Image (cartoon, grey):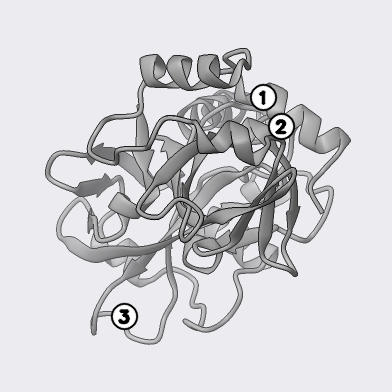
Amino acid sequence: MLRSVNQMIGYRLNATDDELGKCRDLLFDDRWWTIRHLLADTGTWMSGKQVLISPMMILKPDWESRKIFLKVPKKTVENCPVSSADEPVSREYEKKMALYYGYPGYWAGESLWGPAASPAALEQIASQVAEKKAKTKPEETEDPEESNHLRSFDEVKGYRIHAADGSIGHVDDFIVDDETWALRHVVVDTGNWLPGRRVLLSLDWAKDVDWDEQSLTMDLTKDEIKNSPEFDPEKPVNKEYETRLYDFYGRPVEHNINKRIQQQIANPFI
């Protein structure tokens, strides 16, 4: 299913034995456009510490009650490696967290989650590898580079969106696949250009991202976007919705996220 990132802000995070706090932000990988961590607001419980929740730690989300249930007890989270709340999340810190919680790193491989397409698939692969080679540890996973390319949703929300021939608005939301945790679409607030309207655009159509200028350029014209269907956040974004969206723009429906990933590897956004 596809979910709104905006709506995930404020979800309750529940350990196996107690509530941890709320989701206050999400960190995504800007090469793979995939959420790697939920940032928890723990109130006064772990004040001053940065508490990261990997999708690898999630047992199941309950979308109706706005709760996310984890596989670990509260004490385990309390004793996790310490990181200051205002300290950038480094790859070294990610490796420490992976080793502490016992989940594999997502960064080695050519698919969305290293050698796998989803956190669940990565966990299954890791279990099979562990059975064959008990000495394998998360920190031994090959890492082609030390930079982790993490971006905060809170930071990116508000970035300017450009069509091929001019500005059309700013980032209002992202739509994420709740199985792979890949960002699939961007919700654009068209601002003064089309007052009161929001439109949904596939990230498959993103042509360029300039992180310094805080802008995203789409491979579409203003006229194409101007006549597009208005996005209604109250309606679910499902396969039928996606099919109608792609049909409107005359683009083939692409549900294979790995194709976009391979294109980014060959010609990554700068």
Q: Nearer the viewer, residue 1 or 173?
A: 173
Left or right of 188, for residue 72? left
Tell me the element at label 3: loop
Q: Are marks 3 and 1 in contact (CB under 8 Å)?
A: no
Numbered circle sitting on residue 261? 2
Q: Amino acid at mark 2?
A: Ile
Tell me the element at label 2: helix
Identity of the residue drawn at 39% across and 87% down: 48
Residue 238, above or below 153: above
Q: Position of residue 254 (x, y in %)?
A: 60, 17
Find disc 3 in the rendering and name its residue: 46
Identity of the residue drawn at 67% across and 53% down: 216
Q: Nearer the viewer, mark 2 or mark 3?
A: 2
Q: Are marks 2 and 1 in contact (CB under 8 Å)?
A: yes
Q: Residues within 10 Å of mark 1 (few under 14, many from 20)?
A: some
Q: Is residue 183 visible?
A: no
Q: Nearer the viewer, residue 216 or 86?
A: 216
Tell me the element at label 1: helix
Q: Is residue 71 visible?
A: yes
Q: Nearer the viewer, residue 132 or 182?
A: 182
Q: Quadrant of the C terminus?
A: bottom right
Q: Quadrant of the N terminus?
A: top left
Q: Nearer the viewer, residue 75 or 236?
A: 236
Identity of the residue drawn at 51% across and 64% down: 158
Left or right of 55, for residue 59? left
Q: Amino acid at mark 1?
A: Asn
Residue 124, above or below 217: above
Q: CA distance from mark 2 to mark 3?
A: 36 Å
Q: Position of residue 170 (x, y in %)?
A: 53, 58
Q: Amino acid at mark 3?
A: Met
Q: Residues within 10 Å of mark 2 (few under 14, many from 20)?
A: some
